[in-house]
Amino acid sequence: MTRDFDFYIVPTPIGNIQDITVRAVEVLKYVDLIACEDTRTTQKLLNHYNIKTKSISYHKYNEKERLDFFLKELSEGKKIALVSDAGTPMICDPGAVILPRIIENGYSVTSLPGACAVTTFLSQIPRNSEEFFFIGFIPRTENQIKNIITKYSTQNIVFYDSPERILTTLQIIKKHRGEIKTALGRELSKLYEEVIIDTPSKLIEYFEHGIKGEIVCMIYADSNADLSEMNNKINILKSKGFKNKEISIILSALFDYNKNDIYQSAISND
């Protein structure tokens, strides 16, 4: 063990049960209590590594009611570990309610390095930039998805999705971004792991008979980033009520864009 803390954020495997660090196992054995999303899921991991520490459920539906209990345990000198069903807590998982209060009350907090679907996915796909925009679970409605994937079209957009919704999401991406290069990973670290990079149409065709497993995707940035950025600015001004001619004057004055190019793009976006 290294330095002693009051509250530990401990990553758990995203699929392969062996993908856990020696230190993480030591911490889970050392603490007095393990807060987890689903005690049944976590118990399988604990049993595998012969960890006898008591676990208690802690998820988005009971975060507030558990808060006082955890603070009381900490005040009595107890050590607590926070885990999620899979991956690193606080990355699209519970913890946002209790963590600020723990810090506000002066308790020491540390996070262990470990499994995370985003970094596992990104480390095995070629990218044209180190930058990416992570949105967590992609929204449900077409309008929400459209707003995100068009607003951030000049960046690599990374998101989680469910197997029940991913084909619909890909259809929306195709509708509003065309056949943009897209990477899809599923069942990462498991026996049937797949990572495929292709167009939305090809991905839909490949998975037309269904898809299983946890899913993480990346929509690649538009190759013509300058044009995409200009179109984003045009759409913003259109939403404010500016006419095409006014938009061409404003953007050519503020940015290094050709006035005629702006005007033609504005017309095509009507």
Image: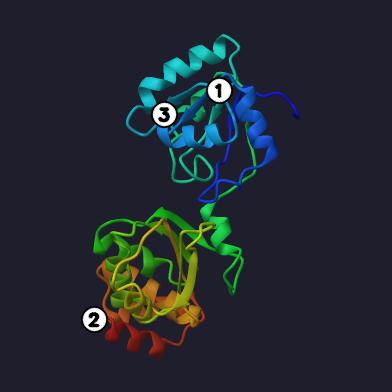
Q: Position of residue 246 (x, y in %)?
A: 32, 78
Nearest to the eye among marks 3 and 1: give it. Answer: 1
Mark 3 Cα shell of 10 Å, populated few (<14), some (14-19), many (≥20):
many
Q: CA distance from mark 3 to mark 2?
A: 49 Å
Element carrying mark 3:
loop
Residue under numbered circle 1: 53
Figure quadrant of the C terminus: bottom left
- Name the residue type under label 2: Asp
Residue occupying the point 48% across, 38% down? 84
The residue indicated by pointer 2 is 270
Question: Which label's residue is closer to the chain start, 3 or 1?
Answer: 1
Residues packed near mark 1 inside 10 Å, few (<14), some (14 to 19) or many (20 plus): some
Dot in front, 3 or 2: 3
Whether residue 26 is visible, yes or no, is yes
Q: What crowding class fits label 2: few (fewer than 14 Cα within 10 Å), some (14-19), or many (20 or more)?
A: few
* Residue 85 to residue 231: above or below: above
Mark 1 lies on a secondary structure that is: loop
Amino acid identity at mark 3: Tyr
Q: Position of residue 160 (x, y in %)?
A: 41, 57
Q: Secondary structure at mark 2?
A: loop
Is 257 or 204 nearer to us in this picture?
Answer: 204
Question: Is residue 131 depicted above or below 50 in this figure?
Answer: below
| Mark nearer the N terminus (3 vs 2) | 3
Relative to 24, 164 lies left or right: left
Near-viewer residue (90 or 84): 84
Quadrant where the image shows the N terminus: top right
Whole-percent x, y for residue 215 in the image = 42, 59
* Residue depicted at x 39% and y 72%: 233
Which amino acid lies under the numbered mark 1 shown in the image of this protein? Thr
Q: Earlier in the sequence, mark 2 or mark 1?
A: 1
Q: Any mark on residue 41, and which?
A: none
Task: Report the residue marked by disc 3.
Answer: 58
